[in-house]
Amino acid sequence: MSAEVVPFDWARIFLGDTPPLFLLEIIFRTTVIFGWLLLLLRFTGKRGLAQLSPLELAIVIGLGSAAGDPMFYPEVPLLHAMLVLAVVVSLQTLLARLVIRSERVETFVEGVPVELVRDGVLSGRALEASNLSREDLFERLRAQGVRQLGEVQRAYFEQDGNLTVFTHAQHAPPGLPVVPPWDLEPPRVVQPGEPVRGPLACLGCGTTRDPSGQQDAGTLSACGCGSDRFTPATTDPLAPPTTVSGAGGDADDRAPGQDGGGRGPLAGLGPD
């Protein structure tokens, strides 16, 4: 095939062997493929966009594909590729203007932010709609310095796939620990028969409850999310163990969080 190629055949380079009317078909093909690509990207979810909107990612893919082939395929005329690039850029400009002028178009193309956390409680439906797992969310929260869900007032999964987190400026209530990562050190589950002392956090959604007056963890009712597994709520799961002086001046080293102050994953659950 390469032996039949005549170098610097200007008619082949710019027009190829197709009739001029084929240029209109290229415009039609590019518009259809660009629209189909944009639609597919819209439904793949924000998680895979990596800080690019579906429109921006479609532009990157479309321009890359159109610009690459004519660089080294002699059978692809430059004029055809140039027309594809012009159509893609024109479509992007048109859609960008429509996004600015129409909220409906913006919602369809870029989606809407999703509230994942409200007042320290996870939304299971929002996580499922966003194609995120609980561990994915915890990883993103840890990257922003969050140690436990009680710190989070709101967490939004933005249109570009980023996570926006609003936390308490100070005096955050205790909540479900997100550190250490559960794959490395899962939180301790309160067992039936264990004495209840201090607030507990649901392992399913992070809802906290203070079961005052209940002496047995086995009497706790299931959370509204359906989970019946709880862990001690904490204000700081990374707080170091405290040392309390006992009788005679001896040091009494407690397990982390057993300082009665709600700190650490085992806060308030020490032996009587």
Image: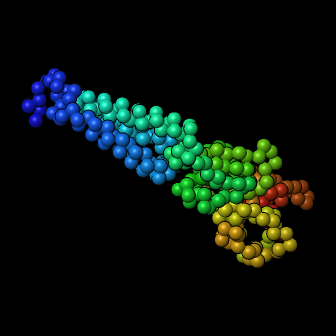
- Where is residue 195? Give x, y as percent: 79, 72
Q: Can residue 14 be seen in this snapshot?
A: yes
In the image, 107 versus 101, the foreground residue is 101
Residue 67 falls left or right of residue 207? left
Residue 73 image-quadrant placement: top left
Quadrant in which the C terminus appears: bottom right
Residue at horizontal 36 percent and vertical 34 percent from the top: 87
Residue at horizontal 56 percent and vertical 42 percent from the top: 102
Task: Give the residue furthest to the left.
Answer: 3
Which colour assignment does the render follow? Answer: rainbow
Residue 220 falls left or right of residue 74? right
Quadrant in which the N terminus appears: top left
Residue 186 image-quadrant placement: bottom right
Q: Is residue 97 above or below residue 121?
A: above
Q: Is residue 218 above or below residue 111?
A: below
- Where is residue 170? Give x, y as percent: 80, 45
- Where is residue 243? Give x, y as percent: 82, 53
Residue 117 falls left or right of residue 200? left
- Where is residue 26? Give x, y as percent: 28, 38
Residue at horizontal 73 percent and vertical 50 percent from the top: 153
In the image, 141 versus 122, the foreground residue is 122
All told, the count of numbered labels is: 0
Q: Can residue 254 be seen in this snapshot?
A: no
Task: Give the residue furthest to the right.
Answer: 248
Residue at horizontal 67 percent and vertical 45 percent from the top: 165
Q: Is residue 7 above or below residue 202?
A: above
